Image: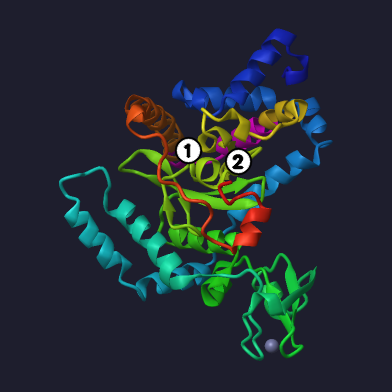
């Protein structure tokens, strides 16, 4: 078999260009396309080897770990939390009320109700954790000391990535705040920052069998998306902000400049930066390393092709259909928006609501 390296230059360039356009090229002969990429690009050792020189790329490939396998205990904890509320009922009522306007179906309403419940009733935002000894929650009287690795049994069990240590200036007690990741633990703790909020909310969606994916912005924020069967699109969701289908929230609302945004599940990682940057504000895209980007896009294409050719046909068609439909519907929506643009200048997007004012300002997310 001729390897990719041995291909004539022209063909090699063409293959890489094809691979880079994943998933838009999925319109045409998906399986043929993927097996071609697989057969040819997978043996492109130089690309893989080059990419190993970039820690950034290695880091991106780890994004799929955020979409970890949920155990039965994780799923049950999520389902119990949802069943203890009346969100199902509220979603059913909303669906009935909106019968005339059939743009959304029951699942869409359910996701909306889940978002509202999650932010208003279920999860709590933590900047500095309150003192568990004296109850002090005066943020000025809690001092951050250090961050360390998990050191208690429960930290390991809850997959704490890091444990933050604080000191209560009221009673001198040490406050331990573990940044948990495991769904079952998050459902029990019900608190954290965007990482915990997103992991917990995404786990709830997944436990309900709602097709979803993890979204990672390289400037320290995460959120998620679910695939709306009714709307035929991947819909942006930010559980910290009770935000539904507002992809311009960060760019227009928070004034957040971003370099990259990736979408990942256990089947693929794709670059979705364009979806989250207002095309009229190219200055909101942070400068990227062009050389590194070329390698990154090739590596993502190879990784995705490798995974997608090994899954069974039904799942393959389901997965790629959601990508194809999303590309089509998003383009339609864009064209529609352009038409009615004259009417409104800016959606009512707000600066960041979660986190205190100073913290938000420091992160450049206060809309200024
Ligand atoms: Zn205290």
In the figure, residue 44 lies in which quadrant? Answer: top right
Looking at this view, is 150 or 285 the one in front?
285
- Circle 2: element type: strand
In the figure, residue 118 lies in which quadrant? Answer: bottom left
Category of crowding for the residue at label 1, using alpha-carbon neighbours closer than 10 angstroms: few (below 14), some (14–19), many (at least 20)? some
Q: Is residue 144 visible?
A: yes
Region of the chain picked out in magenta, as a range: 299-315
Q: Identify the colour scheme used.
A: rainbow
Does 354 sit left or right of 148 as displayed? left
Does 4 sit left or right of 99 as displayed? right
Nearer-N-terminus badge (2/1)? 2
Residue labelled with disc 1: 316
Looking at this view, is 124 or 199 the one in front?
124
What residue appears at the point 78 percent right and 33 percent down from the top-left corner?
51
Principal SS element in the magenta part? helix
Per the rendering, the mark at residue 261 is 2
Quadrant of the image where one finds ligand 1 = bottom right
- Circle 1: element type: helix
Q: Residue furthest left?
A: 100
Work out how far the residue at label 2 is from the one at label 1, CA to CA, in angstroms: 24 Å
Magenta includes 312? yes
- Estimate the x, y position of residue 177 in percent, counting from the top left: 69, 75
What residue appears at the point 63 percent right and 85 percent down from the top-left corner?
136
Looking at this view, is 333 or 166 the one in front?
166
Q: Is residue 283 above or below residue 81?
A: above
What residue appears at the point 36 percent right and 34 percent down from the top-left corner?
344
Q: Is residue 221 above or below residue 323?
A: below
- Estimate the x, y position of residue 229 in percent, counting from the top left: 34, 43
Q: Is mark 1 within 8 Å of ligand 1?
A: no
- Estimate the x, y position of residue 365 in percent, counting from the top left: 60, 50
Q: Residue furthest front?
A: 368
């Amino acid at each position: 078999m001729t390897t990719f390296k041995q291909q004539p230059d022209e063909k090699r360039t063409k293959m890489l260009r094809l691979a880079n356009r994943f998933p838009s090229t999925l319109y045409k002969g998906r399986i043929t396309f993927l097996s071609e990429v697989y057969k040819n690009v997978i043996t492109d050792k130089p690309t893989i080897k080059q990419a190993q020189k970039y820690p950034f790329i290695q880091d991106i490939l780890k994004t799929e770990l955020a979409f970890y396998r949920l155990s039965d205990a994780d799923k049950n904890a999520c389902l119990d939390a949802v069943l203890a509320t009346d969100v199902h009922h509220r979603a059913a009522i909303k669906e009935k009320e909106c019968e005339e306007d059939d743009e959304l179906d029951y699942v869409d309403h359910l996701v909306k109700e889940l978002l509202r419940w999650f932010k208003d009733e279920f999860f709590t935002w933590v900047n500095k954790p309150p003192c568990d000894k004296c109850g002090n929650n005066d943020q000025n009287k809690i001092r951050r000391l250090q961050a360390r690795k998990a050191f208690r049994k429960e930290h390991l069990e809850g997959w704490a990535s890091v444990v933050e240590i604080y000191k209560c200036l009221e009673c001198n007690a040490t406050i331990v705040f573990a940044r948990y990741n495991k769904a079952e633990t998050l459902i029990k703790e019900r608190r954290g920052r965007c990482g915990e909020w997103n992991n917990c909310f995404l786990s709830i969606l997944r436990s309900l069998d709602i097709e979803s994916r993890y979204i990672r912005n390289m400037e320290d924020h995460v959120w998620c998306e679910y695939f709306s069967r009714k709307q035929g699109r991947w819909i942006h969701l930010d559980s910290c902000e009770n935000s539904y289908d507002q992809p311009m929230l960060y760019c227009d609302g928070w004034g957040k400049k971003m370099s990259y945004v990736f979408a990942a599940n256990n089947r693929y990682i794709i670059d979705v930066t364009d979806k989250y940057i207002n095309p009229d504000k190219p200055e909101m895209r942070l400068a990227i390393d062009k050389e590194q980007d070329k390698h990154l896009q090739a590596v993502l294409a190879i990784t995705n092709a490798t995974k997608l050719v090994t899954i069974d046909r039904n799942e393959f068609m389901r997965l790629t259909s959601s990508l194809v439909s999303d590309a089509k519907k998003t383009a339609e929506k864009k064209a529609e928006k352009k038409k009615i643009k004259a009417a409104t200048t800016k959606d009512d997007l707000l600066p960041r609501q979660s986190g205190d004012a100073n913290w938000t300002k420091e992160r450049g997310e206060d809309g200024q």
